[in-house]
C-alpha cells in the first residue's frame, strides 16, 4: 500500500505548489474512517482509494481531485457525513464526494432502477464539475483491475456495465488510454476465450514483426529528416477489443486482418503535420478511401489527428496517425490533458466548456438524457448516445452537427433543436429533397423543412436512433394524445352538463374532479377523454354534486369539434374511434341511439381485420360496436338500418406486436399432397393457421377456408400472392361473410356440449 509521503511526492513532482496539508489531512481522514475494512482481495479497503489517487496522479490532476479520490467512498461506506466533509475539507470537495456517492436502494424497485438512478445522479454531478467524472473513471478502472477477486456472478454484470457505460464515456471524453484498458479488461471477463486467442496472436505478431517495424520506422524517419521535419515515429499494437470488434463487424477471420499494427508520427507544429502527410503520400502508394483529416474537423471528443493508410515495404499495409505533441496528449488523456483545466478547477468552468467540445457535448447530452424518462429508457438512451460511431453533417449555415452512424434527418432535426424536430415535415440533403428515413453520411448538408402546425407521428420513434430524438418524439406523442383526450373530455363534460340541465362553475368542476379521485380539472378531462371515467359515472357524480336525481337515459356519442376528435374504448386497445363529419343529420341519428358507453363491447367482423385495412365501425342499438374492413360485404346489410356509422382507425403505437385473425378462401384440386402444399406455402410466409374448414365442390375439387394469424396487411398480401402462385389453386381471396360463418359454424359444432350430471347418474 502506498505510504502517505509517497503520494504527496507524486503530486509535488508535477505540481510543486500543491497543498500538502490538504493531501495529508485527506490521507489520514480516509485511513481512519475506513479503519479495518477489507476488500474482496483481503487487502485493507483504504488501498482502493490510494490506487484511485495514484491513477489520477498519472493524469497530473490538481490536489483537490487527489483529495477527493482519497475520500470518495467515505460517505457511502463509513459513518462520515457530507456535513463533516464540508467542515473539514470545504464545500467544493464535499460536493464532488457527494456526487460520487450512490443512492440507497431502499426505495428503489429493482437493480435496473437503482442503476439508472445512480447513473442519473452521477451524470448530473459531472455536469456541475468534470472532476466527478475523472475520479469515477479512475475508481472504475481500479475496480476492473481487481475484478478477479469478486464473486463470479458479479463479474459479468460489472464488466458489461463498464463496456456499456464507462468505457464509451471515457472515449467520448477523449481519454483513449483509459478507454482501451477498460474495454480490454471487460473483454477479458466477458469473452475469455476470444481474449486469450487475440492477445496470443498479438504477442506472436509483435515478435515476428520487429524487423518490418524497424524498417518502416527507419525509412519513414529518413524521408522526414531530408525535408527538415523533426519527428518521433513509434509503432503500436491495436487493443484486443478493437480487433475483436472489427472481426465481428466485418465478419472476417483474425488472420485476414492486415492493420493490427499502426504507426504514430508526432511533430512540433500543425504545419508540419500536413508537410509530413505530403512526404508520406509522395513516397508511398496511398490506399484509397483511408484518409481522414481530424485536424480540420475534430471529433466530438476534441480528438485531432490525420489518418492515412499506405502500402509500405513488402506490400504491407501501414496505418499512420500524424499529430503534434499537444494533440497527442489530448488524444491519450482527453479532457484531463486540456490546457485550460487548471483554470477550470479554480472556478472558470464556463471557459472549459467553451474550449472543450467534449465537455460541451457531455453537458448538452446530460441535459436531455435526464428529462424524466423511466429507468429503462434512460439506460437505453445513455448507451445510444455514448456507444455509437459518428458522422458529421452541416446545417445550411455551416454549423457542424455530430450524430451516431445510421442517423436520419429526424435525428439531425432534433439535434439542432427540439422545436425543429417537432415541426419537421421534410428535408433536403445536399440540395435534393430526400425521405426522412435517409441515412446521413459525413459531409452531408441537411436542410430541414418545417410546418409550425405539424407534430411528430408515433412511428418516428422507430426511425430515429438518438436518445434525444426518441425522448422528444415520445414526449410530443404523449402531449398530443393528452391534448386530444382533454379536448374530447371537455366535449363529454359539456354534453353531460347540458343533458342533465346543470350549471357547474369552475369551483364545482374542481369539486367534481375530487369526487372522481382526480387532482384537478385537466386530469378529469383527460381521464374522461381516455375512457377511464365513463359517461355514466360522470352523470351520477355531477347530478349528486348539485343535489339532483339523474334523469333516465344515457349519454350519446360526443361530436368532435377539434381537428382530430378520436377517442378510445376500453375493450378495443388496437383501435381509435371518431364520429364521422358532424353534420346535423348525423347528430340526430346518433341522438336516437342509446347505450353508448366507453365500456361497450367491441366485436370484430367474422372475416377479420388486420393492420393496414381501412376500417369502419357499426354502433348497434344494443350498445355494441362492431368493426369491419371497408370492403366487407356485410356492410351492405346496414345501409338502411338504424345503426350508427363510426370512423375507426388503427392505434398500434406503443402496443406489443401481435397477430390478427383473418379468413381466406380458395378452391383446390383434390389430389394427394395438395393440403400439405398449401400449408407449406402459408408457413413459408411466416403466417399461422389457427383453423380450417373444407367443403367438397365436386369429385375433383374442394373449397378450403383457412383462419390465419398474420401481423399486418403486407404479410397477408404476401400469403395471398404465394397461394395464387401455387399449382392447383384458384379463386384465392379474403373470405366473404358467408364463408367466414362456415368456419365459425364448424367451431360451434365441435364445441363440447355440457352434460347434465343427474341424467348421467340415472343412465
Image (cartoon, helix red, strand yellow):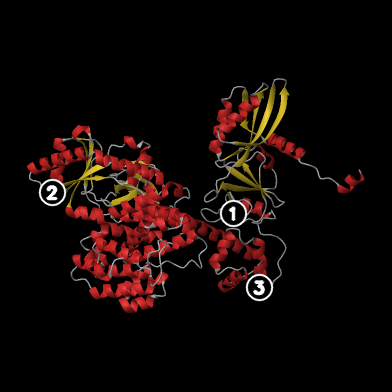
Q: Is residue 326 left or right of residue 26?
A: left
Q: Which residue is mark 1?
A: 568
Residue depicted at 29% across the width and 59% down the height: 360
Mark 3 vs mark 2, foreground winner is: 2
Residue depicted at 29% across the width and 40% down the height: 204
Rendered location of residue 301, percent (x, y):
28, 54
Question: Disc 3 versus disc 2: distance between alpha carbons?
Answer: 85 Å
Assign the N terminus to one quadrant of the image: bottom left
Q: Circle 1 sits in a helix, a strand or a loop, which is it?
A: loop
Q: Earlier in the sequence, mark 3 or mark 2?
A: 2
Residue depicted at 39% across the width and 43% down the height: 194
Mark 3 vs mark 1, foreground winner is: 1
Question: Disc 3 versus disc 1: distance between alpha carbons?
Answer: 29 Å
Q: Nearer the viewer, residue 634 or 706?
A: 706
How would you rate the neighbour count of disc 3 (Cα within 10 Å): few for under 14, some for 14-19, many for 20 or more? few
Q: Which residue is mark 3?
A: 546
Residue 739 sits in which quadrant?
Answer: top right
- The reply to whether callout 3 and callout 1 are in contact (CB within 8 Å) is no
Amino acid at each position: 500500500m502506498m505510504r502517505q509521503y509517497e503520494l504527496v511526492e507524486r503530486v509535488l513532482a508535477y505540481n510543486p505548489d500543491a497543498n500538502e496539508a490538504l493531501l495529508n489531512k485527506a490521507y489520514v481522514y480516509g485511513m481512519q474512517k475506513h479503519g479495518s475494512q477489507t476488500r474482496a482481495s483481503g487487502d485493507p479497503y483504504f488501498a482502493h482509494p490510494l490506487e484511485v489517487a495514484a491513477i489520477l496522479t498519472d493524469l497530473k490532476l490538481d490536489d483537490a481531485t487527489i483529495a477527493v479520490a482519497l475520500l470518495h467512498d467515505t460517505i457511502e461506506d463509513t459513518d462520515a457525513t457530507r456535513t463533516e466533509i464540508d467542515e473539514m475539507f470545504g464545500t467544493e470537495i464535499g460536493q464532488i464526494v457527494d456526487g460520487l456517492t450512490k443512492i440507497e436502494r431502499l426505495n428503489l424497485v429493482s437493480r435496473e432502477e437503482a442503476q439508472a438512478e445512480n447513473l442519473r445522479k452521477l451524470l448530473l454531478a459531472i455536469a456541475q464539475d468534470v472532476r466527478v467524472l475523472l475520479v469515477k473513471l479512475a475508481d472504475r478502472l481500479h475496480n476492473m483491475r481487481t475484478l478477479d477477486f469478486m464473486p463470479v456472478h458479479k463479474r459479468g454484470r460489472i464488466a458489461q456495465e463498464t463496456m456499456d457505460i464507462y468505457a464509451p464515456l471515457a472515449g467520448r471524453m477523449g481519454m483513449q488510454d483509459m478507454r482501451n484498458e477498460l474495454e480490454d479488461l471487460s473483454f477479458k471477463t466477458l469473452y475469455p476465450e476470444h481474449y486469450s486467442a487475440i492477445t496470443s496472436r498479438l504477442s506472436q505478431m509483435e515478435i515476428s514483426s520487429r524487423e518490418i517495424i524497424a524498417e518502416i520506422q527507419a525509412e519513414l524517419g529518413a524521408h522526414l529528416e531530408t525535408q527538415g521535419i523533426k519527428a518521433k515515429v513509434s509503432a503500436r499494437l491495436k487493443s484486443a477489443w478493437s480487433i475483436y470488434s472489427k472481426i465481428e463487424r466485418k465478419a472476417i477471420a483474425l488472420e485476414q486482418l492486415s492493420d493490427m499494427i499502426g504507426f504514430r508520427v508526432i511533430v512540433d507544429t500543425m504545419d508540419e503535420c500536413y508537410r509530413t502527410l505530403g512526404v508520406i503520400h509522395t513516397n508511398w502508394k496511398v490506399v484509397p478511401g483511408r484518409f481522414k483529416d481530424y485536424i480540420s474537423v475534430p471529433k466530438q471528443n476534441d480528438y485531432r489527428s490525420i489518418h492515412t493508410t499506405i502500402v509500405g515495404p513488402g506490400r504491407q499495409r501501414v496505418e499512420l496517425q500524424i499529430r503534434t505533441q499537444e494533440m497527442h496528449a489530448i488524444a491519450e488523456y482527453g479532457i484531463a490533458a486540456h490546457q485550460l483545466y487548471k483554470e477550470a478547477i479554480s472556478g472558470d468552468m464556463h471557459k472549459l466548456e467553451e474550449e472543450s467540445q467534449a465537455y460541451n457535448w457531455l453537458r448538452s447530452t446530460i441535459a436531455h438524457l435526464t428529462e424524466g424518462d423511466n429507468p429503462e429508457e434512460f439506460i437505453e438512451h445513455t448507451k445510444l448516445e455514448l456507444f455509437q460511431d459518428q458522422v458529421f453533417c452541416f446545417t445550411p449555415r455551416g454549423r457542424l452537427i455530430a450524430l451516431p452512424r445510421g442517423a436520419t434527418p429526424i435525428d439531425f432535426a432534433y439535434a439542432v433543436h427540439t422545436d425543429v424536430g417537432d415541426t419537421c415535415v421534410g428535408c433536403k440533403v445536399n440540395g435534393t429533397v430526400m425521405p426522412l428515413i435517409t441515412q446521413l453520411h459525413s459531409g452531408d448538408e441537411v436542410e430541414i423543412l418545417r410546418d409550425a402546425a405539424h407534430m411528430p407521428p408515433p412511428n418516428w420513434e422507430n426511425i430515429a436512433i438518438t436518445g434525444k430524438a426518441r425522448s422528444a418524439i415520445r414526449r410530443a406523442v404523449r402531449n398530443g394524445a393528452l391534448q386530444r383526450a382533454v379536448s374530447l373530455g371537455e366535449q363529454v363534460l359539456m354534453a353531460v352538463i347540458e343533458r342533465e340541465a346543470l350549471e357547474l362553475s369552475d369551483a364545482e368542476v374542481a369539486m367534481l374532479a375530487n369526487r372522481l379521485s382526480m387532482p384537478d380539472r385537466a386530469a378529469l378531462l383527460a381521464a374522461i377523454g381516455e375512457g377511464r371515467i365513463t359517461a355514466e359515472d360522470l352523470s351520477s357524480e355531477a347530478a349528486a354534486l348539485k343535489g339532483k336525481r339523474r334523469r333516465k337515459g344515457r349519454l350519446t356519442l360526443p361530436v368532435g369539434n377539434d381537428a382530430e376528435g378520436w377517442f378510445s374504448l376500453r375493450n378495443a386497445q388496437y383501435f381509435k374511434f371518431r364520429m364521422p363529419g358532424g353534420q346535423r343529420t348525423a347528430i340526430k341519428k346518433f341522438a336516437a341511439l342509446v347505450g353508448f358507453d366507453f365500456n361497450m363491447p367491441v366485436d370484430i367482423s367474422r372475416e377479420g381485420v388486420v393492420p393496414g385495412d381501412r376500417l369502419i365501425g357499426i354502433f348497434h342499438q344494443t350498445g355494441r360496436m362492431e368493426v369491419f374492413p371497408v370492403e366487407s360485404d356485410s356492410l351492405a346489410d346496414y345501409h338502411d338500418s338504424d345503426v350508427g356509422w363510426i370512423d375507426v382507425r388503427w392505434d398500434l403505437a406503443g402496443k406489443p406486436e401481435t397477430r390478427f385473425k383473418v379468413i381466406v378462401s380458395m378452391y383446390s384440386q383434390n389430389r394427394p399432397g395438395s393440403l400439405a402444399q398449401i400449408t407449406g406455402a402459408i408457413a413459408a410466409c411466416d403466417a399461422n393457421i389457427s383453423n380450417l374448414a373444407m367443403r367438397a365442390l365436386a369429385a375433383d375439387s374442394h373449397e378450403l377456408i383457412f383462419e390465419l394469424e398474420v401481423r399486418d396487411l403486407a404479410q397477408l398480401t404476401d400469403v395471398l400472392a404465394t397461394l395464387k402462385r401455387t399449382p392447383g389453386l384458384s379463386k384465392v381471396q379474403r373470405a366473404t361473410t358467408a364463408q367466414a360463418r362456415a368456419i365459425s359454424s364448424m367451431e360451434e359444432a365441435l364445441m363440447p356440449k355440457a352434460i347434465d350430471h343427474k341424467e348421467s347418474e340415472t343412465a
